[in-house]
Amino acid sequence: MLDEMSVTLFREWREYSDLEPFGEERADLRAGQIAAMLYNINRKRGSASKNARDFLLFGEKAKPRRKTWQEMKAIGAMIAGAANKPRPKPPPKHQPVKRNRPTRGKHGR
């Protein structure tokens, strides 16, 4: 799928997932909501309530570390290598199969 997706489209999907998470991040949040509800209805009187984020398995997104120029160069080389990779030739178009007609029997049918 990534071979067929443009870089622009990929970036747009990443930005969309930051605004509206889907996949495992969304599933993790749903599980956290259920865990928080169960915790809050069973907690002792006077104890602090919890919210869904307190139960996330993946946690909040970590602040990205600034990459070194060597890491950025390596990433650029990987992207260039993927973009310049020769595309496989498409399969030949379907050609109709020539079928031999059955020979007529001795009754001419």
Image (spheres, helix red, strand yellow):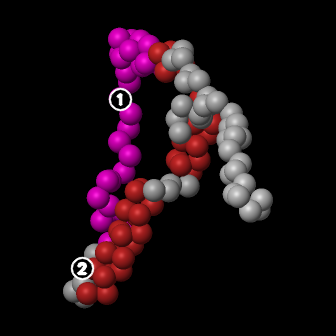
Residue sitting at 72 percent across and 54 percent down?
Answer: 104
Q: Is residue 86 among what the camera can see?
A: yes
Q: Quarter holding the C terminus?
A: bottom right
Left or right of residue 40: residue 88: right
- Tell me if residue 30 comes above or below residue 23 in the rendering: below
Compared to 36, does 3 lie above or below? above
In the image shown, does 104 or 71 lie closer to the viewer?
104
Tell me how far mark 2 sits from mark 1, CA to CA: 37 Å
Tell me what residue is drawn at x 28 percent, y 80 percent.
39
Q: Picture coordinates of residue 63 (x, y %)?
A: 38, 38
- Residue 63, relative to residue 23: is it above or below? above
The circle drawn on residue 47 is: 2
Q: Which structural element holds mark 1?
A: loop
Looking at the rendered structure, which numbered label has been put on residue 25?
A: none
Res 51 seen here: no
Answer left or right for 93 relative to 56: right
Residue 83, how many percent across, how many down? 54, 19
Residue 24 falls inside the magenta stretch? no
Q: Which residues are magenta?
A: 50-79
Secondary structure found at label 2? loop
Q: Quadrant of residue 77?
A: top left
What residue is drawn where x is 36% and y is 76%?
34
Per the rendering, the mark at residue 65 is: 1
Residue 49: image location, x then y, percent: 31, 76
Q: Residues within 10 Å of mark 1 (few under 14, many from 20)?
A: few
Nearest-to-viewer mark from 2 and 1: 1
